């Protein structure tokens, strides 16, 4: 990482439980009590049926690489090249994240590859979810 800092999230009342859980090494998603749809990003209603009867649940932090791009331009807090990824969790929701622990080489990174979460402590206040190739 460069000396320049990456922008940090600004938690809202809806997303604060998600960020608080990351500090405790837990990945939370939300699930609708009416239709059982699991989703991310945090919202106070179900994006599938609009019910507001939703709850938090812990995801196991495993999934597969759904899509990715290798970014060759530096951004604040990121040394290029780096991998911007969309991970599909085993519970269903997709998350935009970074794939780490693998060279940003299109010969190595494959869609559908198994990935697992890495809790990245970016500072004392924030832990962010990144993903790496799964060891299993
Ligand atoms: Zn629903």
Image (tube, grey):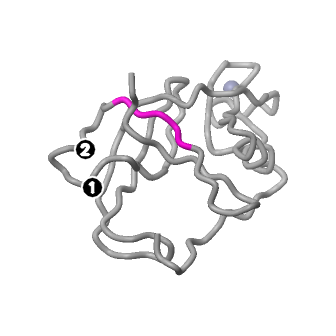
The C terminus sits in image quarter: top left
The local crowd at label 1, few if under 14, some if 14 to 19, many if 20 or more residues have their Cα within 10 Å, is some
Viewer-side residue, 3 vs 35: 3
Residue 8 sits above or below residue 106 on the image: below
Q: Is residue 40 left or right of residue 15?
A: left
Q: Disc 1 marks which residue?
A: 104
Residue 48, image x, y percentages: 62, 31
Residue 77, image x, y percentages: 50, 72
Q: In the rendering, which numbered label is found on residue 48?
A: none
Residue 78 sits above or below residue 120 on the image: below
Q: Is residue 43 left or right of residue 83?
A: right
Q: Disc 2 marks which residue?
A: 109
Q: Would you say residue 116 sits in the magenta stretch?
A: yes
The magenta segment is: 114-118
Viewer-side residue, 77 vs 110: 77
Q: In terms of image quadrants, where is residue 113?
A: top left
- Marks 1 and 2 close (CB-CB < 8 Å): yes
- Of label 1 and label 2, which has the lower sequence position? 1
Q: Secondary structure at mark 2?
A: loop
Displayed-image quarter of ligand 1: top right
């Amino acid at each position: 990482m460069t000396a320049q800092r990456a922008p940090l999230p600004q938690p809202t009342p809806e997303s604060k439980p998600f960020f608080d859980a990351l500090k405790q090494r837990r990945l939370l998603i939300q699930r609708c009590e009416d239709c059982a749809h699991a989703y991310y990003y945090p919202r106070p209603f179900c994006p599938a049926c609009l019910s507001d009867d939703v709850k938090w649940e812990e995801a196991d932090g495993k999934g597969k690489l759904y899509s990715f791009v290798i970014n060759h331009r530096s951004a604040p807090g990121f040394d290029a090249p780096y991998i911007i990824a969309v991970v599909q969790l085993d519970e269903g929701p997709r998350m935009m994240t970074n794939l780490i622990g693998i060279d940003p080489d299109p010969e190595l990174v494959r869609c559908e590859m198994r990935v697992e979460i890495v809790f990245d402590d970016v500072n004392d206040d924030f832990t962010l979810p990144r993903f790496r190739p799964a060891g299993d």
